[in-house]
Image (spheres, rainbow, N blue to C red):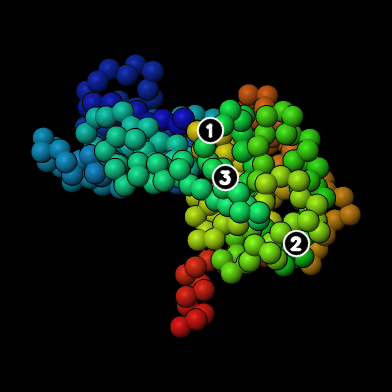
């Protein structure tokens, strides 16, 4: 789990390059993504709002990103130890985020045969790969053979995989027919309501999200670079981003490139659908 620790003003921190005099200093684990930072800031806001001892107003923290050094958030906040996962809420004062985490872990999504699955539950896997697709996206369909190869190659190594259709109006019958035509061997889920899609924060078909057993975002983006751009495809990929990320995860190493740009068909959202219908 990613973590954030803040120190009281005046506390001795001899290893810090900055003297702590008036402001608290919050160290952020380098793997914490932008969503984790947002949740952390929200928790800090809530904590300060509940503190009668602190009379100063909270100011948005200054975020300094440096992969070679510890990231810093500087702000006038009360001391606390806050926990935040990349795709999970901050523990402690952030009750709404904690509720979202609980909802995620109990999320039940049915597959094309009507069987329920809980893709965000820790079932002993080393990582979970979620492949998000639209059934009528030709770019996603062209990736089906490589998706199946990755599922087979990494299953024995402890990676759990799901294919996820995100269309709200896709029937089980059509989805089941499509999954069989393309030979998908992992569980194929119907994400009606798009809760899984929003949790993973994917926007393109095909796009993959790799989560830790604690639902931290370990990798998100393209499968490989064969789809160079819309209308441009390489015969063979020059980078196999997902495989490289999975190999690093299974070796206990941080993912060198945890975020890549996926190329494909934009995923529809419930909001867009409502706007088109109005």
Q: Which mark is residue 122?
A: 1
Q: Which sits in the foreground, 53 or 136?
A: 136
Q: Which mark is residue 74?
A: none
Q: Name the residue furthest bottom.
A: 278
* Residue under numbered circle 2: 177
Measure how far apart labels 1 and 2 are at the Cα level.
30 Å
User: What residue sits 71% from the left and 59% below the top?
Assistant: 176
Q: Is residue 133 above or below residue 217?
A: below
User: What residue sits 63% from the left and 66% below the top?
Assistant: 171
Measure how far apart labels 3 and 1 are at the Cα level.
12 Å
Residue 213 at x, y percent in the picture: 54, 32
Please tell me in which quadrant of the rendered image residue 218 appears.
top right
Residue 151 at x, y percent in the picture: 74, 41
* Residue under numbered circle 3: 117
Residue 41 at x, y percent in the picture: 33, 43
Q: Answer yes or no: do the residues labelled 3 and 1 have beta carbons within 8 Å?
A: no
């Amino acid at each position: 789990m990613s973590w954030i620790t803040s120190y009281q003003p005046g506390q001795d921190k001899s290893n810090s390059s900055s003297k702590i005099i008036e402001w608290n200093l919050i160290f952020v684990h380098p793997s914490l993504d932008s969503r984790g930072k947002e949740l952390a800031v929200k928790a800090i806001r809530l904590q300060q709002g509940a503190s009668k001892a602190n009379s100063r107003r909270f100011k948005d923290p200054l975020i300094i990103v440096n992969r070679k050094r510890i990231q810093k958030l500087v702000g006038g906040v009360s001391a606390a130890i806050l926990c935040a996962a990349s795709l999970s809420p901050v523990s402690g004062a952030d009750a709404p985020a904690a509720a979202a985490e609980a909802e995620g872990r109990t999320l039940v999504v049915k597959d094309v045969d009507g069987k329920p699955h809980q893709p965000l539950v820790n079932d002993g896997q080393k990582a979970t790969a979620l492949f998000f697709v639209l059934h009528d996206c030709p770019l996603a369909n062209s990736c089906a053979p490589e998706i199946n190869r990755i599922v087979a190659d990494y299953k024995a190594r402890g990676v759990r995989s799901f294919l996820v259709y995100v269309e709200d109006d896709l029937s089980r019958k059509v989805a089941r027919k499509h999954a069989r035509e393309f030979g998908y061997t992992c569980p194929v889920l119907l994400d009606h309501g798009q809760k899984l899609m929003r949790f993973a924060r994917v926007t393109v078909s095909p796009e993959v999200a790799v989560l830790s057993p604690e639902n931290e975002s370990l990798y998100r983006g393209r499968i490989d670079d064969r789809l160079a751009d819309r209308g441009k495809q390489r015969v063979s990929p020059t980078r196999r981003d997902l495989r490289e990320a999975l190999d690093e995860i299974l070796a206990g190493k941080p993912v060198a490139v945890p975020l890549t740009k996926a190329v494909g068909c934009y995923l529809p959202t419930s909001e867009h659908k409502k706007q088109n219908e109005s």
